[in-house]
Image (cartoon, rainbow, N blue to C red):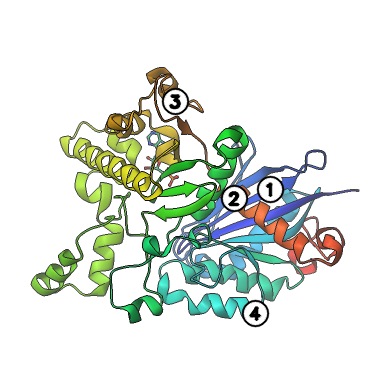
Amino acid sequence: MSRHQSCLVLNAGSSSLKFAVLRRDEATEDLHQVLNGQIAGIGTDARFEARDANRRVVAQRRWSAEDSQRRPALLEYLLAWLGQALPEDRIVAAGHRVVHGGRGFSRPVRVTPEVLAELQALVPLAPLHQPHNLAPMRALAASHPELPQVACFDTAFHAELPWVASTYALPQELSYEGVQRYGFHGLSYEYVSQRLAALRPELANARVVVCHLGNGSSLAAVHAGRGVDTTMGFTALDGVPMGTRSGSLDPGVLLYLMREKGMGADALEDLLYRRSGLLGVSGVSSDMRALEQSTDPAARRAIELFCFRVAKEVAAMAGSMGGIDALVFTAGIGENSPGVRAEVCSRLGWMGLAIDDYANGRSALEISADDSVVPVFVLPTNEEKMIALHTLAVLAASAPNGREADEGQPCSTARTPATC
Ligand code: AMP
């Protein structure tokens, strides 16, 4: 039986392991997602759920509190389940989302023991995420050493930021040791920029501001497909307010909290990452949809603050490029909230930007009014697909004659992982 070539994409967080399987269409060479899902509640009450391409739930399962702590066993369960669920697929590689590539990793890379050691050294730059991203790589390397793995970085898209965009006005020695703007959400920016160029080839060399607005939010200035500025910085705290993250604030606020409230690093981390943003301002929810449905005036204030800050950063990103030729909204809020898009754009009328209410209400591909000086788009992001594309490309490039994906020793999902 000839089987489909597929790529497993893993996005591991502190308490969740998100996954997707993308299958290569032999006729078009394009990749299509056949399954996705997650194991949530890892460490406490692990729950597995998988959905098919039509978003129908196809499997669910729960674990005891004790079993919920066995991370490698949960990963093995996922692989075994995939083997049964996709008997016609051969998983030829696993692609991992990795939050930080530091200065060294400016493109996706095949995972080796040396690469793992270098990524481990970057943990201090992203202590909340990086260790969790690396854990499944180690587990897979131990249990399935024949399965090629590729690390794809959220920072890589911003690796060529001009120095004026990446440098903080701090003493040089801190810059030398890596205290600088890195930027995140790079896989989303890359995907969206490529989609825009495919859909509107006349914008391939344009100055585009992309607003990735989700639970985590940031903006990027993208010129001819390359990142030239972005709102997130050394960490994913910087920039616009997010679901529970503060976004930028005067660093003097931290000094005040330390001196006057006796707050240490852990308390500040909790405040800035988990109790601020939309949740902190509204006191209602971190979730934009819930805020839009709320009648609480504080929920409305949180939305207004969010839109104000996003609009201000659109202008800042345009300034970094000396102009703007297109504006793109993506991610959960950007793709689904006509209200936020309308409010952000109405603050940018001075730029000659105007949206069409009907197109915006339907979240059409192009939502700008006919007389808008700048076209405005809504483009669904697909970080999983970007990771799978990178993973298969790295695999092909690192193979003799570019044929590794065909001739290597792929992990067969038709067999149990123990025999892959
Ligand atoms: P993400 O992190 O990209 O999954 O985005 C999550 C955010 O998108 C949450 O704040 C959601 O409330 C928001 N979101 C998703 N769907 C909608 C919707 N239909 N209207 C408003 N916000 C939405």
- Camera-side mark, 3 or 1: 3
Point out which mark residue 22 bears.
1
Quick one: 132 or 153, which is closer to the camera?
153
Task: Report if the CB atoms under discs 3 and 2 are less than 8 Å apart.
Answer: no
Secondary structure category for the residue under label 4: helix
Residue, disc 4 = 113
Mark 4 Cα-neighbour bin, 10 Å: few <14, some 14–19, many ≥20: few
Task: Report if the CB atoms under discs 4 and 1 are less than 8 Å apart.
Answer: no
Residue 198 image position (x, y, % from top left): 62, 37
Report the Cα–Cα distance between label 2 and label 4. 24 Å
Seen at 27% across and 33% down, the residue is 347
| Quadrant of the drawing holding the C terminus | bottom right
Give the residue furthest to the front: 322
Secondary structure category for the residue under label 3: loop
Give the residue furthest to the left: 260
Point out which mark residue 217 bears.
none
Task: Report if the CB atoms under discs 2 and 1 are less than 8 Å apart.
Answer: yes
Residue type indicated by callout 3:
Ile
Residue 253 image position (x, y, % from top left): 16, 64
Quick one: 41 or 10, which is closer to the camera?
10
| First reached walking from the N terminus: tag 2 or tag 1 | 1
Seen at 38% across and 32% down, the residue is 337
Seen at 28% across and 67% down, the residue is 269
Judged left or right of residue 45, residue 271 is left
Residue type indicated by callout 4:
Pro
| First reached walking from the N terminus: tag 4 or tag 1 | 1
Q: Quadrant of residue 325?
A: top left
Residue, disc 3 = 367
Mark 3 Cα-neighbour bin, 10 Å: few <14, some 14–19, many ≥20: many
Judged left or right of residue 132, residue 250 is left
| First reached walking from the N terminus: tag 3 or tag 1 | 1
Residue type indicated by callout 1:
Leu
